[in-house]
Amino acid sequence: ATPTRALTILLAQGTSRLIMALMQTILILGIGVLVFHFHLPHGWVTFGELLILSSIGLIAFLGFGYFLSGLASDENSAGPLVNLVTLPQFLLSGTFFPTDSLPTWLQPIANNLPLSYFNLAVRHITTEGGTLIETWPYLLGLMAWGIAMYILASRTFRWS
């Protein structure tokens, strides 16, 4: 009943979900370090960098979800629509196998997916001992996707 813009509603929803997802991220990283002895190359610095990276990724992926939910006509069509986007990203972004093994015509698409940027940044920080600053190209790509998705989500947002 107040004259609130769609983008404001989306950002507020995103912030609340981000807080919950960050708490889950802290729990998962904590269990990984304490129980499974996951090695963080720079200790607490790496832990903090992964939280920042996770925040940026979560914001971008939430924007994706809000955009897709705006396209869906009802809750029954939202699930298949999200799966239509999510499954190819899992398969093409290097989550399960390297993108180098994909056909050459598909690699430019696969390397520019938001999950690809996130995966590359996480790998650089955790396995190569890099820093968050060194992942700036991946961060820019991820942020560009996030901004684009929130803009599109604000255009497809419906009050019903």
Image: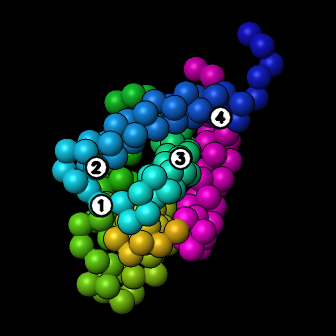
**Residue 123 location, x and y as percent?**
38, 69
Label 3 vs label 2, nearer the camera = 2
Mark 3 → mark 2, Cα distance in angstroms: 19 Å
Q: Earlier in the sequence, mark 1 or mark 3?
A: 1
User: Is residue 50 found inside the magenta-colored segment of the image?
Assistant: no
**Residue at x-position 34% and y-position 71%:** 127
Residue 47 horizontal side relative to residue 70, left or right: left
Kindly state the secondary structure of the residue where label 3 is placed.
helix
Compared across the picture, whether 82 is left or right of 31 comes to right
Q: Residue at x 39, y 42 (%)?
A: 25
Corner quadrant of residue 16 = top right
Extreme residue in the top direction: 1
Front residue (pair 26, 99)? 26
Of the image marks 2 and 4, the number of the one nearer the N terminus: 4
The residue where tag 3 is placed is 55
* Three-letter residue code for mark 3: Ser
Query: Going 19% across and 44% down the picture, which residue do you hit?
Result: 35
Residue 33 got which mark? Answer: 2
Q: Tell me where residue 116 appears, x and y as whole percent.
A: 42, 67
Q: Mark 2 vs mark 1: which is more N-terminal?
A: 2
Q: Position of residue 23 (x, y in %)?
A: 43, 33
- Label 1, secondary structure: give it: loop
Q: Give the mark, 1 or 4, whose residue is nearer the N terminus.
A: 4
In reply to whether residue 144 is colored magenta, the answer given is yes
Dot 4 amino acid type: Leu
Q: Which residue is mark 4?
A: 11
Real-space CA distance between mark 2 and mark 4, rounded to the nearest whole angstrom: 32 Å
The quarter of the image holding the C terminus is top right
